[in-house]
Image (tube, grey):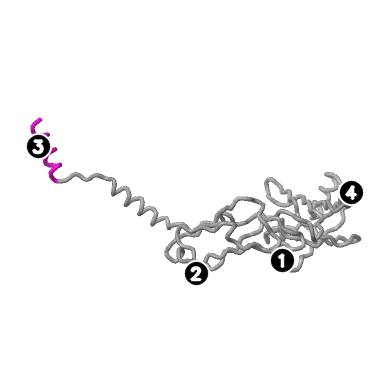
Amino acid sequence: MAGEIPDLHAQERTGTGKGAARAARREGMVPGIVFGGDKDPLPINIPFNKLLTKLRAGRFKSTLFNLKVDGHEDVRVICRDVQRDVVKDLPTHLDLMRLRRTTKINLFIPVDFINEEETPGLRKGGVLTVVRGEIELLVTAGDIPEKVTVDLSGLEIGDSVTISQVTLPEGAKPTIDRDFIICSVSAPTVLAADDDAEEGEETTEVPTVGDTEDAAEGGAEE
């Protein structure tokens, strides 16, 4: 389960609108807004370099943060959107939503595949095909899981793992009702190609010596 909630430091932004946002970017800041929680929206600025570091670390949108803004009480937030420059793909604005510990939210949680060395199908040359590297779960804001663990031990070639076979973190449930596949162990490509070739050979008719001689005699008579 998730450990200590990381801090996210920001400054209250004076002024709103495009002009204030552009001024913030010129100062090396990324403008943002904090909304929800039965309180008025709070415009903020976050240092560009610190935000970029967190974004590159991954899982930014599925991480619960403790937002610290001078002059305001700390509040738990989660990112709902990061707007980026269409050319440079760098953050230009972000939206943060205030959360209570008991708030239920949908988040994509990464999947961790374990015991590959104990998978018979992989030892025989099979290939692990990952259908879902992340799973969308309904979770409690105060108890967001770090990952969903999928145990691969015992899987043979042709076997698959579905969501119903996985033990989910306590309090979490999938947002999709059907029993979807997370991963499977497929036959190696070379083996599959050899099988196709063998099937093709079985269906190919090879003329016998007698057939060849009959065809030659028929040609001579003509």
Query: Residue beneath label 4, please?
Result: 15
Mark 3 is surrounded, within 10 Å at the Cα level, by few (under 14), some (14 to 19) or many (20 or more) other residues, namely few
Q: Is residue 221 magenta?
A: yes
Category of crowding for the residue at label 2, using alpha-carbon neighbours closer than 10 angstroms: few (below 14), some (14–19), many (at least 20): some
Q: Which residue is mark 3?
A: 217
* Among the two numbered marks 3 and 2 on one chain, the one whose residue lies closer to the N terminus: 2
- Where disc 3 sits, the SS reads helix
First to last magenta residue range: 209-222
Q: Earlier in the sequence, mark 2 or mark 4?
A: 4
Q: Nearer the viewer, residue 37 or 34?
A: 37
Amino acid marked by disc 4: Gly
- The numbered disc on residue 2 is 1
In magenta segment, residue 129: no
Q: Which is nearer the eye, 205 or 46?
A: 205
Q: Position of residue 208 (x, y in %)?
A: 16, 45
Q: Nearer the N terminus, badge 3 or badge 1?
A: 1
Residue drawn at point x = 68 percent, y = 61 percent = 57
Q: Are marks 3 and 4 in contact (CB under 8 Å)?
A: no
Magenta span dominant secondary structure: helix
Residue 120 vertical position relative to residue 189 in the rendered view, above or below: below
Across and down, in percent, residue 144 comes to: 72, 62
Indicate the amino acid at tag 1: Ala
In this orientation, does residue 187 appear? yes
Between circles 2 and 4, the one closer to the viewer is: 2
Image height check: is 112 above or below 217? below
- The residues bearing labels 1 and 2 have C-alpha atoms spaced at a distance of 27 Å
* Type of amino acid at the residue the image marks with label 2: Glu
Label 4 near label 2: C-beta < 8 Å?
no
Is residue 212 left or right of 91 when viewed as pictured?
left
Badge 4: how crowded within 10 Å, few (<14), some, or many (20+)?
A: few
Identify residue for label 2: 118
